[in-house]
Image: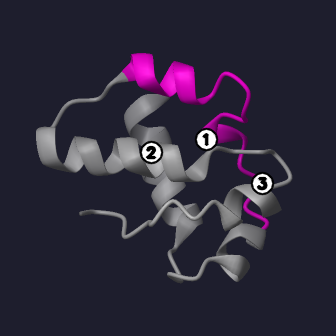
């Protein structure tokens, strides 16, 4: 597993842009296993949430993350895969 996210969603509750961090990390983990991106799922996961590139880099998500994940770093990786 690339990102040790348990999908607790604490980060989602703190994000001022309502970015669906747990589901995006799930897609990043899927890519690490399969080597394939799934844009259809990204579009679905982002329908009522902010896109990964909209991250303000405020760090509120990292301050509350029980796994102490470098969320901003992994979101940057996600943006490189799904939005460039």
| Vertical position of residue 53 compared to residue 45: above or below | below
Query: Which residue is painted at 55% across and 66% down in the image?
Result: 71
Q: Residue at x 73, y 27 (%)?
A: 48
Seen at 54% across and 21% down, the residue is 44
12 or 53: nearer the viewer = 12
Report crowding for label 1: few under 14, some 14 to 19, many 20 or more residues within 10 A (C-alpha): many
> Per the image, is 34 magenta?
no
Query: Relative to the observer, which residue lies in front, 79 or 34?
Result: 34
Mark carried by residue 37 = none
* Highlighted range, magenta: 39-58
Q: Residue furthest right?
A: 16
* Residue shown at 71% from the left, 55% from the top: 12
Quadrant location of the N terminus?
A: bottom left
Please give the residue where the numbered disc 3 appears in the rendered image: 56
Label 3, label 2: how far apart the Cα atoms are: 15 Å
| Measured Cα–Cα span from mark 3 to mark 1 | 10 Å
Residue 45 on the magenta span: yes
Residue 50: x %, y % from top left: 72, 36
Pointer 3 with pointer 1, Cβ within 8 A: no
Q: Residue furthest front?
A: 8
- Name the spot of residue 69 as percent of width and height, x first: 50, 75
Left/right of residue 55 with respect to residue 74 in the rendered view: right
Residue labelled with disc 2? 78
The disc, 3 or 2, on the residue closer to the chain's N-terminal end is 3
**Residue carrying label 1:** 52
First reached walking from the N terminus: tag 2 or tag 1: 1
Verify CB contact (< 8 Å) between mark 2 and mark 1: yes
Q: Toward which corner of the image does residue 43 lie, by quadrant? A: top right
Quadrant of the drawing holding the C terminus: top left
Query: How far across and how far down the image is residue 19, in percent?
Result: 69, 45
């Amino acid at each position: 597993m690339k990102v040790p996210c348990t999908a607790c969603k604490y980060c989602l509750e703190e994000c001022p842009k309502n970015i669906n961090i747990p589901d995006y990390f799930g897609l990043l983990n899927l890519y690490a296993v399969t080597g394939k991106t799934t844009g259809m799922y990204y579009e679905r996961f982002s329908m009522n949430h902010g896109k990964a590139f909209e991250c303000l880099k405020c760090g509120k998500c990292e301050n509350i993350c029980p796994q102490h994940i470098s969320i901003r770093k992994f979101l940057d990786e996600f943006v490189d895969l799904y939005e460039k």
